Image (spheres, rainbow, N blue to C red):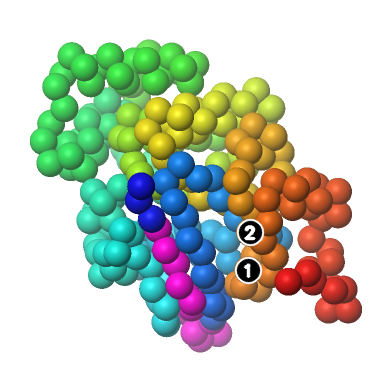
Amino acid sequence: MSVLEIRDLYVTVETEAGITPILNGITLTMNTGETHAIMGPNGSGKSTLAYTIAGHPKYTVASGSITFDGQDVLAMSVDERARAGLFLAMQYPVEIPGVTVTNFLRTAKTAIDGEAPAIRGWTKDVKTAMSNLRMDPKFAQRNVNEGFSGGEKKRHEILQLEVLKPKFAVLDETDSGLDVDALKIVSEGVNRAKEATGLGVLLITHYTRILRYIRPDFVHVIVAGKIVEEGGPELADRLEDEGYDRFLDPAAPIEA
């Protein structure tokens, strides 16, 4: 079992107004095989947490720590984090002109494992994963995210997840912009990856609809850069009914 630990994490970002605090003391422990949902209103710091784990240079860790099996994640470069087994599915995947999906996936797998995968087995794995995600085989020869629809971009993110086999996946609003059918297909891909490898999932979302397909073990509510409530799947169900108003209203009581 692997463990990802976040301890008293404070993160800032530089804006036109100066240095702005975004995360204000986040503490969270994840084990492989677990699914943790991070929920909260817009602007609460959810995506900042995702990009800080991945090592985005825009964000500065003012204090606190992130460790992965005891290793200091904050001391690792972005590629070292990927090789260690961390994966980020971005909310807005970027285009990579001139690089096909096939070349991208094999290059990424080679970089992570330190050696190129055997062609026959690798080709079979990619074709199987694409079929499960209902992706046209011709998709493999397209340039990464170039001209992709929103749904295609999200399927490609989950294709990476299935074939690269990380230990922990951070999914940043993977459900955004997906219709019901695409949401179900993408969710099934996440569930397959978890079942196949014991993947740990940190699922960041604003809405509860994806949690109908990817059932969380733990739910954490972030407001103003702090975790204000934690619980199990029942907390997500409550948020479905009540929304976030009680966390945003200063007069409303917040359960410890």
Q: Nearer the viewer, residue 106 or 162?
A: 162
Find residue 113 and report its image quarter. Answer: top left
Residue 9 is covered by the magenta coloring: yes
State the residue in front, 50 or 29.
29
Residue 176 seen in render: yes
- From the viewer's perspective, is 13 left or right of 215? left
- Tell me where residue 157 appears, x and y as whole percent: 43, 36
Residue at coordinates 87% horizontally, 73% vertically from top-left?
252
Residue position marked by numbered label 1 in the rendering: 227
Q: Is residue 216 above or below residue 25?
A: above
Name the amino acid type tagged 1: Ile
Q: Residue at x 67, y 61 (%)?
A: 230
Decide whether residue 59 is among the magenta residues: no
Q: Quadrant of the C terminus?
A: bottom right
Report the residue marked by disc 2: 220
Q: Secondary structure beneath disc 2? A: strand
Q: Is residue 27 left or right of residue 57?
A: right
The image shows residue 159, relative to residue 40, as above or below, that is: above
Q: Position of residue 137 (x, y in %)?
A: 37, 13
Residue placed most toward the observer, 96 or 175:
175
Task: Specify the segment rendered in magenta.
Answer: 4-20
Verify CB contact (< 8 Å) between mark 1 and mark 2: yes
